[in-house]
Image (cartoon, grey):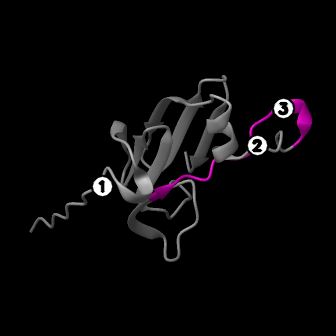
């Protein structure tokens, strides 16, 4: 038996714009929409890059990227995902493994989360 569920992500409301890239992992998906990175699916190992209540989220929500900044500034330079968008930093590449994700930004920063 095959169970299918279709999720329509609207190009209006909270996630305005259009999907420009999609990457799929073992049981999760990343969607890049007009410089907003969204995730949905399984989150057993943190592969969504954001908090979920029960380890799964069928609602596409914005990924919580860590603060941006140089490595010599400890935990980052104090800019979150919204601040990064304002200074022209955008997602350049993204990919998913079975239980992890990796994102490269236009400023050369690379973020990896999940297991693997």
Q: Is residue 106 above or below residue 33?
A: above
The alpha-carbon separation of the residues under discs 2 and 1 comes to: 27 Å
| 96 falls in the magenta region | no
| Residue highlighted by disc 3 | 71
Residue 59: horizontal and vertical position, in percent? Answer: 39, 65
Q: Is residue 89 above or below residue 37?
A: above
Residue 9 is labelled as: 1
- Of tags 3 and 1, the one toward the viewer is 1
The alpha-carbon separation of the residues under discs 3 and 1 comes to: 35 Å
- Whichever of labels 2 and 3 marks the residue nearer the N terminus, that label is 3
In the depicted view, which residue is nearer to us: 114 or 108? 108
Who's the residue at 90% across and 36% down the image? 73
- Whichever of labels 3 and 1 marks the residue nearer the N terminus, that label is 1
Instruction: Look at the image and give the residue range highlighted in magenta.
Output: 61-74
Q: Is residue 108 left or right of residue 72?
A: left
The alpha-carbon separation of the residues under discs 2 and 3 comes to: 13 Å
Q: Main secondary structure of the magenta part?
A: loop
Who's the residue at 83% across and 30% down the image? 70
Residue 55: horizontal and vertical position, in percent? Answer: 48, 70
Q: Is residue 22 left or right of residue 95?
A: left
């Amino acid at each position: 038996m095959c169970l299918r569920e279709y999720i329509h992500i609207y190009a209006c409301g909270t996630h305005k714009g259009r999907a420009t890239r999609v990457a799929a992992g073992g049981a999760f998906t990343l969607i890049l929409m007009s410089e907003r990175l969204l995730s949905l699916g399984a989150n057993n190992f943190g592969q969504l890059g954001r908090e979920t209540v029960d380890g799964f989220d069928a609602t596409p929500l914005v990924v919580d990227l860590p603060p941006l900044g140089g490595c010599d500034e400890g935990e980052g330079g104090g800019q979150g995902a919204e601040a990064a968008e304002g200074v022209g930093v955008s997602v350049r590449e993204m990919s998913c493994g079975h239980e992890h994700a990796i994102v490269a930004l236009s400023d050369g920063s690379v973020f990896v989360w999940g297991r693997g």
